[in-house]
Amino acid sequence: MLYFITYISRFIYIFLMILFIIFGWQCYKRLPSQKQAAYFAHSQLILIALFQIMTDTIILLHTLQEGGDLKQAFIWLGAEAGGMLLMGILAETLHKGTGRLIWNAVFMLLSISIAILWRLDEAVAIQQIRWMLICFGLINIVLLVMRGNWIYKIPVVVFILASCGMVLLPFVFPYRAGGALNWAYIGGFVFQPSEFVKISFIFLIGYIYSRRFSWFGLILAAALTGFIGLVLLMQNDLGGLMIFGIIFWFMTYEYLDHKLWLVLGALAVIVAGFVAYKFVGHVRIRVDAWLDPWSDINAGGYQIAHSLFAIVGGGWFGTGLFRGMPTYIPVNTTDMVFSAVAEEFGMLFCILLILLYTFLFMTMLEYARHENEAHKRSLLLGFAVLFMTQTFVIIGGATKLIPLTGVTLPFISYGGSSMLSMTILIGIVQGIIRSSYPPVRKEVPEDEEPQHIGPQQPYQQPQYVQQPPYGQPGPYAAPQPYGRPQQYGQQPPVYGQQPPVYGQQPPVYGQQPQTYGQQPPAYGQQPPVYGQQPPVYGQQPQTYGQQSVYGQQSVYGQQPVYGQQPPNGQREPAPQDDTIRTPYQF
């Protein structure tokens, strides 16, 4: 039974991912109405729940078959589902106005993470669930902090000291892992400071580039980027060096708004890579292993070779959860987790996973494009580039597209530092989105018919105003002197006449008194007949019982059609406005 469920689950996982991408793309590309967007977003939540049910079923059946601790599996898998459910409720209530598509994408990535990590190492998966619950609490704190604008008024000196200080921590509290000295050991905790330097660095560059153009600001940003890059090169953190360089490249391009900078940046990357290959031994080893991993498969090319073996071994549809051999992949829970996903879930599933990362990146760019404030726009662009660059670096290294570097796959790889930094990133992005939440046009429910002004309205007998006796003043107020400002809703006075008081007309001998809202006849025209509207210059008077179509303006010289109403079941089109619609939010 377990084998049959695992075999069928390969196709179910791919089908669920296809639907998830389609629903997200419908919200991103078409920008539907709020009702349709809510339908797509809720459908994504249902797909995430089905993904979780399928994964938990396979994990529990496998634990039962292997004689594992079934109670422990129930507790932690339930904690994972409960944490996501609670976070989703808080996002809809406490953090209303944040991007729902971003929340759904993060929840799907976390579901994939727990599934593959539980397959690789149950203890690591449990620890990842702990970090996930901690991150859910952290992102609520970040969103509450982002409610105030004081965070955008922090002096730039604070971000300079924070960035330079944190990147130097591994030299003060060293902890070497994987041939790189980019870890710090403080108080029994081991973490990677460069993960948090990325956030402060984006705030730093965004603050500088949000001001008017100045060569001093550009030189300062370049100098700080060069200092951080030099420190990372000394720590053998090639992945971090590449990420910081690309972030500076794209944020500077947005600041200068000149295509020449893209060419210069590309040339600078090529020159820097060539110099590093010639003078840095660690870089030379990575590049040689990337060019020909088979020549030294047991040493430098070991990771890339086994990564390619796993990707090819999984095929298009994967081997199924617990049916492959991803445990032979080196560092499979962190750097090479994408290869493990490819073997268990298949290459087609990994293509959809790349599309999911791309969709999340494009959604952040869409919000950045609609942002009016320069500082917030720079932050959104920087965080979007950081997210996609880190994804590209690790997937490109695992598939031999670029030299392999030690970075994590966002929200899937195991790691407390990576999870915390990416959680802070998403919290800041969602806080900016909520602060810049655009107004959404209120829509008329489909079951609510518009109120038409036409023959279907009940006929009301007009009330006559009693004529005053001859020679006595009537109930009309004295006319206002010519030139006094008119009140709202009055027509301009005819030449030679005094403007009437709002809602009242002076009586004319032989003419029925006018009711409220009726206009006096122009010079040379006959008084209107009872039940007929006064004519407008150039138009024929309407006959009794004839009404113009609701919501349409009368055209000069055009006769209204008798009894014409909007088609049955259709609504009058909503008025057009200049509201910018962004991807769906709460």
Image (cartoon, rainbow, N blue to C red):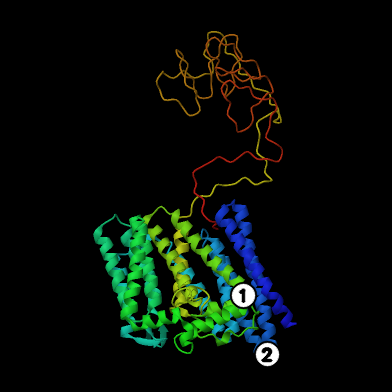
Between 510 and 380, the one nearer to me in the picture: 380
The answer, for residue 457, to whether it is visible in the render is yes
Extreme residue toward the right, this view: 1
Q: Position of residue 256 (x, y in %)?
A: 33, 56
Q: Position of residue 57 (x, y in %)?
A: 68, 79
Q: Quadrant of residue 254?
A: bottom left
Task: Kindly state the secondary structure of the residue where label 1 is placed.
Answer: loop
Residue 66, labelled with which disc?
2
For the point 46% across and 75% down, the residue is: 420
Instruction: Name which residue type carries label 2.
Output: Glu
For the point 64% across and 70% down, the residue is: 14
Task: Kindly state the secondary structure of the residue where label 2 is placed.
Answer: helix
Instruction: Name which residue type carries label 1.
Output: Gly
Q: Image quadrant for the C terminus?
A: bottom right
Q: Position of residue 147 (x, y in %)?
A: 43, 61
The residue singled out by tag 1 in the image is 346
Q: Nearer the viewer, mark 2 or mark 1?
A: 1
Instruction: Say if 94 sits above or below 549 in the image.
Output: below
